[in-house]
Amino acid sequence: MAKGESLGEFEYLVLLAVLRLNDDAYGMRVRREIAERTDRDVTIGAVYATLDRLAAKGMIRSEMSDPTPARGGRAKRSFRLTGAGIQAVNRSRRELENMLEGLAFPLPRGSR
Amino acid sequence: MKPPMLARLLLLTVAGEAEGEFVAGDLHEEFLHLCATRGRPAGNRWYAWQVVRSVVTLLGLRLRSGEAMQLALAALSVAVPLLLLDRLWCFVYSQIPLKDGLDRAPGFLAVNVLYVCICSALCGSAARSFQRAILIAAVTAAAAAFALWPAAGETPAIYVWLVLLTAPASSLLVFTWRRFG
């Protein structure tokens, strides 16, 4: 696997959020989706920085929509997974499953 | 209903032209939602806190977008040749025996002004938004001021003012002409 194809933890979460939101994946919805499902306090800046990085890796592509009054007259940038993005999600899931295999959860407290 | 002005200004300042539009739109949308569900003070607090916590990442995004490179190029292309030309003039002049003081010929100063004018115009023509054009104009003016610093007091005031004014003016004029012409 070439360098740059592997996903960081937050990148993985962002890709999954984009996948879940389907046609409605834009910055604030991605942020809200991650915040609601992981109970993390995520900033919009962190989401956009990650989306930008994923777009540079070719894992997502974006398209603009027309400005709306609900957004203060500003345009919206929606995101979609590319083939490379879907491959990266599948690979990350497989890697995680392989690493979790044989472990019993929840893990006991204290050191092993 | 508008989000807090200081937070909006901070966002405009730190976010690049591309991200600024989308981030501000996203935050505005959520701000309106929060104001409707939890009240205006909560919406204001949330908006300001999001902007403050996003400052570093938005600045990083802005640097990666190539804006820093464009501004650095504008500064260097104005300052370095001006400094080098002046040093060259000083060197050549120092080789002349029995001179009195260091006089820069009007022709030499006119060439400098013309150079600054052309170079700033080229930098301004590369700007794609008004915000970027203003930044480039400010950077070219600052670079020109930096380049004039070593010769301060040795050149006519009219020359200094001409350079300091033509740098940002030609940059903005060319941007305006390309945009609306």
Image (tube, helix red, strand yellow):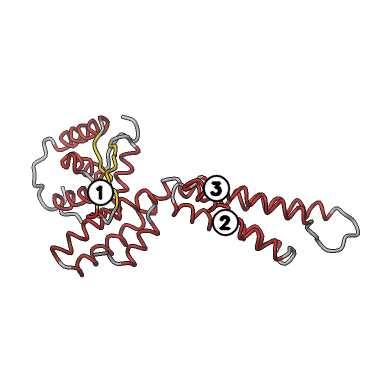
Q: Which residue lies under the disc numbered 2?
A: B169
Circle 3 or circle 1, nearest the eye: 3
Q: Which residue lies under the disc numbered 3?
A: B123
Q: Could you tell me residue A109's position as x and y percent?
A: 11, 52
Of residue B115 and residue A35, the one placed in the foreground of this image is B115
Q: Could you tell me residue A37's position as x and y percent?
A: 13, 49
Marks 3 and 1, how far apart at CA: 32 Å
Q: Amino acid at mark 2?
A: Ala
Label 3 residue SS: helix
Marks 2 and 1 on same chain: no
Q: Residue furthest right?
A: B98
Q: Which residue lies under the disc numbered 1?
A: A27
Question: On the rendered image, what quadrant is the N terminus of chain B found in?
Answer: bottom left
Chain letter behind tag 1: A
Relative vertical location of residue A85 with respect to residue A109 in this rendering, above or below: above
Q: Amino acid at mark 3?
A: Cys
Residue visible at 8% across and 41% down in the picture: A104
Residue visible at 28% across and 37% down in the picture: A60
Left or right, B86 with respect to A58, comes to right
- 10 Å crowding of disc 2: few (<14), some (14-19), many (20+): many
Q: Amino acid at mark 1?
A: Gly
- 10 Å crowding of disc 1: few (<14), some (14-19), many (20+): many
- 10 Å crowding of disc 3: few (<14), some (14-19), many (20+): many
How many numbered discs, if any? 3
